[in-house]
Structures are given as structure tokens and as C-alpha cells.
Amino acid sequence: MPPAKASIDRDKASADYLQLFYPFHYRVGFAVENALRGGILTQHQTVILWIIHSEGGSAKSMRRKDIEARISAWFDLTSSAVSKAVRSLAKGDKPLLRMSEDPRSGREKLVSLTSDGELYIAGMISRAEKVILEIIQGLDSEEIQDGLRMLGRIAEEALALDRDGIGG
């Protein structure tokens, strides 16, 4: 029979979680983010691509104003700064994004990943997975599984708080 789990002092646990904020958010988070950026893109460009990849559905496209709403939840950006970042990703020999008129509104732009954008995303994912693999190299299978379960639950709880307008 496995040993009984110890009772947790939630007030102390929140302080312990806070102590982990710096190493996890800034050290781990930035290491993964730098891998995603690949030394080429800015932080904002990277987030824009990731938002479209994650929330753009099977068409991998979103309205510009929806991208702006998502990225503005993380960064204090003006509408023109978002437009500038999107336009920069839609330029060059191998643009990562394509902008077109939104069929629902002539004033709104639809922003889509190009095939080069999809390839870039695949590279982002590969680079980030390698960094994460290095980070978890010293963990055993049970620790990895427990960590994934814990992070998943924390993400669910944070999303629920966000939906309820708490904590922001």
C-alpha cells in the first residue's frame, strides 16, 4: 500500500509556488521562448505566429483584431505596433504570414500562415522540444508524468480564473 500523502498547508504552498516563479517563468520560459524565436524573430512576432498556430483553427488564420486582443492580454502593445509586427511577417522573399480582406468585413484583415510560416512553426516546435528535453533529462518517468499532470491542472485553473476575470 502506498504511503498516505501528507497534508498540504495551502498558504505555505502558495509561497513555495511564488519562489518557483522566477526560475520557472524567467529561466525555463525564456529558454523555451528563445528556442521558439530561433534568433530571428522578435518576441512579439513569435507570439503572433504561436497565437495563429494555436488558435487559428484548421485554416491557421485569424482576424487581425483577434490577434491583437490575444497578444494585448500579455503585452502592452498599441494597435499600430501589432499591425507593424504582422506586416513585417508578411514581407520578404519567404513571408510567414499572408494578409487578405476578411470576407465578413471589408475593413478587417484576415491573417493566415503561409506554407513557409507553417514550416517555420514546425522548426519552432522542434527547437523548443529539444530545449525542454534538455531541461527534463534528469527526471524519471514518474516525475515527468507528475509534472505534466500538475502543469496541466494549473493551466486549467488559471484559465478558469481568467474566464471569471479574477487574478488579472
Image (cartoon, rainbow, N blue to C red):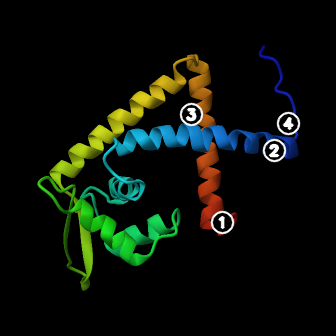
Q: Residue at x 52, y 62 (%)?
A: 74
Q: Picture coordinates of residue 44 (x, y %)?
A: 40, 59
Rounded to the nearest angstrom, the CA distance separating label 4 from label 2 is 12 Å
Residue designated by label 4: 8
| Secondary element at image label 3 | helix
Marking on residue 110: none
Residue lying at 57% horizontally and 17% vertically, measured from the top left: 138
Q: Is residue 35 left or right of residue 149?
A: left
- Residue under pointer 3: 148
- What amino acid is found at the position of numbered circle 2 in the picture? Ala
Tell me the SS state at disc 1.
Answer: loop
Residue 158 left/right relative to 33: right
In the displayed structure, 16 sits above or below 84; it is: above
For discs 1 and 4, the disc positioned in front in the rendered view: 1
| Labels 3, 2: front one | 2
Q: Earlier in the sequence, mark 2 or mark 1?
A: 2
Q: Residue at x 47, y 23 (%)?
A: 134
Marks 4 and 3: in contact by CB < 8 Å?
no
Chain-order first, disc 3 or disc 4: 4
Which amino acid does the dot numbered 4 rest on?
Answer: Ile
Q: For this rendering, which residue is in front, 127 or 167? A: 127
Q: What label sits on residue 168 in the rendered view? A: 1
Q: Read off the residue under disc 2.
A: 15
